[in-house]
Amino acid sequence: MNMFRLVVALLFLAYGLIIGVLNTQPITLKLLFTEFQTSSGVGIMLSLLLGVVVGGLIVVATLVWPLYAKLRRANRSAAAASGDAGPSAADSGR
């Protein structure tokens, strides 16, 4: 499995390098309070990276956190149902 991950990572690295090499035209990125010059390849890769980060944060906020809260509630209710009285009866009868 680690070899598969390495191959996929190298393919994405090669893809990024190809985009960077083929898109060398200078562009100006204007942000709220600043602007800077870069190549269009770097602008494309930064846009893709920003999209992945924002998408990941949306998935975490809408799926992971609610499921984690549900799991904590289920664990609490299971612990309360089991009695939580300390050691079990089998341990106390030495």
Image (cartoon, grey):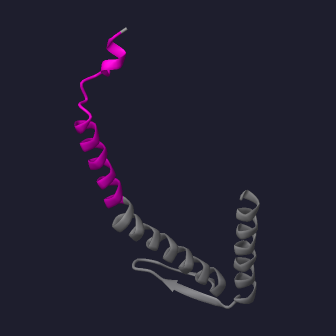
Q: Quadrant of residue 15?
A: bottom right
Total numbered labels: 0
> Which quadrant of the rendered structure holds the N terminus?
bottom right
In this picture, which residue range is highlighted in magenta? 65-93
Is 24 rendered above or below residue 49? below
Residue occupying image coordinates x 72% and y 57%: 2
Residue 78 location, x and y as percent?
A: 28, 42
Q: Residue furthest bottom?
A: 25
Residue occupying image coordinates x 30% and y 53%: 69
Residue 11 location, x and y as percent?
A: 74, 74
Residue 14 location, x and y as percent?
A: 76, 76
Taking 87 as reference, is 42 left or right? right
Viewer-nearest residue: 51 or 75: 75
Taking 13 as reference, is 63 left or right? left
Taking 18 as reference, is 46 left or right? left
Is 12 rendered above or below residue 69? below
Taking 78 as reference, is 44 left or right? right
Is 61 rendered above or below residue 52? above
Is 19 rendered above or below residue 57? below
Residue occupying image coordinates x 59% and y 89%: 27
Any magenta on residue 91? yes
Q: Residue furthest top?
A: 94
**Dominant secondary structure of the magenta stretch?**
helix
Residue occupying image coordinates x 27% and y 34%: 82
Any magenta on residue 31? no
> Which quadrant of the rendered structure holds the C terminus?
top left
Viewer-nearest residue: 73 or 49: 73
Viewer-nearest residue: 54 or 62: 62
Residue 68 location, x and y as percent?
A: 35, 54
Viewer-nearest residue: 78 or 17: 78
